[in-house]
């Protein structure tokens, strides 16, 4: 039996300058979550953080996050999301002096669990993507550690609905189809993701698919489909992997669920177009 914690969408923003685009005090939330993790009766063997580590991908925010997580006694595994930048992450979290744009894909074995992490972020996209090299990495990783339960982590969950208007909230349809082929026949205990800021659990081709609300702000699932409605709300998950399978227990933090904003699909398309132009 292995206990671990799933965090996602931290959206840390360095204290200065004040980030007026932030919907909540993400630093305070992470400190609160840290306290709760530190007090767990069964300390987690590791912590998964499935992307959007920072709100703007700037160096100072990664350095701030690194400081906040520095005294944790267990390994912390990170994925990158659409709010992250590879250059900022590598410099701020890993001390890689050179600016590198390489995807951050990695694997680790901790207390008998094999965790494979893929970087689905793309600079000009809200939605997620995986390229040939990443699929090759995944195929090789899946062949490693035979007999150990495997956990996959990436920011963008596989697409569940093939509606082009909503491809921004998941892994691309093409990558989703290819991923389904690659994982077929492998014993995968769970896939952990974020991005859409709501706690959502699915069964995807027999694999438990866990999306966390995260530690920033929530999307209102009751409004979903008419655009997005953002509300206050954060949670994280305590996960237990047993021989019988995976259990995920959400730990919601107190919230008013007050609305913080609404965006139409046209707003989101305009935002993505502006990002593409800026690149
Ligand atoms: Fe996010």
Image: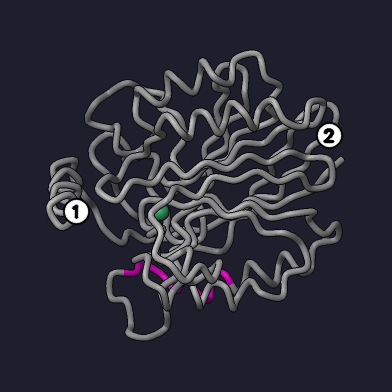
Q: Quick one: quadrant of the C terminus?
A: bottom left
Q: Quadrant of the N terminus?
A: top right
Q: Nearer the viewer, residue 96 or 182?
A: 96
State whether residue 208 is above or below residue 211.
above
> Which badge, 1 or 2, is on the more N-terminal residue?
2
Secondary element at image label 2: strand
Compared to 269, does 20 lie above or below?
below
Q: Which mark is residue 108?
A: none
* Residue located at (34% from left, 66% from top): 56
Q: Residues within 10 Å of mark 1 (few under 14, many from 20)?
A: some
Q: Is residue 195 left or right of residue 207?
A: left
State whether residue 12 is above or below residue 275: below
Q: Residue at x 78, y 26 (%)?
A: 146
Q: Is residue 102 above or below residue 158?
A: below
- Report whether 227 appears left or right of 174: left
| Residue nearest the observer in this picture, 47 or 254 | 47
Picture quarter containing residue 43? Answer: bottom right
Residue 275 x/y as whole percent: 19, 53
Give the percent coordinates (x, y) of residue 193. 52, 42
The residue that disc 1 covers is 275
Q: Secondary structure at mark 1?
A: helix
The CA span between labels 1 and 2 is 43 Å
Q: Nearer the viewer, mark 1 or mark 2?
A: 1
Residue placed most toward the observer, 258 or 165: 165
Q: Position of residue 103 (x, y in %)?
A: 45, 47
> Is residue 29 within the magenta segment?
yes
Q: Residues within 10 Å of mark 2 (few under 14, many from 20)?
A: few
Query: Residue 90 in the image: x percent, y percent?
Result: 48, 64
Q: Ligand 1 appears in which quadrant?
A: bottom left
Name the image quarter holding residue 85: bottom left
Q: Which residues are magenta?
A: 22-30
Badge 2 is on which residue?
A: 242
């Amino acid at each position: 039996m292995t206990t671990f914690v799933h965090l996602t969408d931290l959206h840390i923003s360095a204290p200065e300058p004040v980030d007026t685009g932030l919907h909540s005090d993400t630093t305070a939330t992470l400190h609160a979550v840290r306290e709760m993790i530190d007090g767990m009766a069964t300390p987690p063997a590791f912590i998964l953080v499935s992307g959007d580590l920072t709100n703007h991908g700037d160096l100072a925010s990664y350095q701030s996050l690194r400081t906040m997580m520095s005294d944790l006694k267990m390994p912390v595994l990170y994925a990158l999301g659409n709010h992250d930048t590879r250059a900022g992450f590598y410099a701020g979290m890993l001390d890689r002096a050179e600016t590198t744009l390489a995807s951050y894909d990695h694997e680790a074995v901790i207390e008998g669990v094999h965790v494979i992490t893929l970087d689905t972020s793309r600079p000009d996209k809200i939605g997620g993507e995986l390229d040939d090299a990443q699929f090759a990495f995944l195929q090789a990783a899946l062949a490693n550690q035979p007999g150990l339960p495997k956990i996959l982590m990436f920011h963008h969950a596989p697409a569940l609905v093939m509606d082009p208007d909503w491809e921004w909230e998941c892994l691309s349809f093409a990558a989703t189809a290819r991923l389904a082929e690659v994982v077929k026949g492998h014993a995968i205990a769970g896939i952990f993701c974020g991005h859409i800021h709501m706690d959502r659990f699915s069964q995807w081709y027999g694999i438990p698919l866990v999306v966390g609300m995260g530690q920033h702000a929530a999307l209102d699932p009751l409004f979903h489909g008419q655009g997005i409605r953002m509300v206050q709300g954060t949670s994280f998950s305590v996960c237990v992997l047993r021989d019988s399978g995976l259990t995920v227990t959400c730990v919601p933090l107190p919230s008013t669920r007050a609305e913080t904003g609404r965006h139409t699909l046209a707003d989101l398309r305009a935002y993505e177009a502006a990002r593409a132009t800026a690149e």
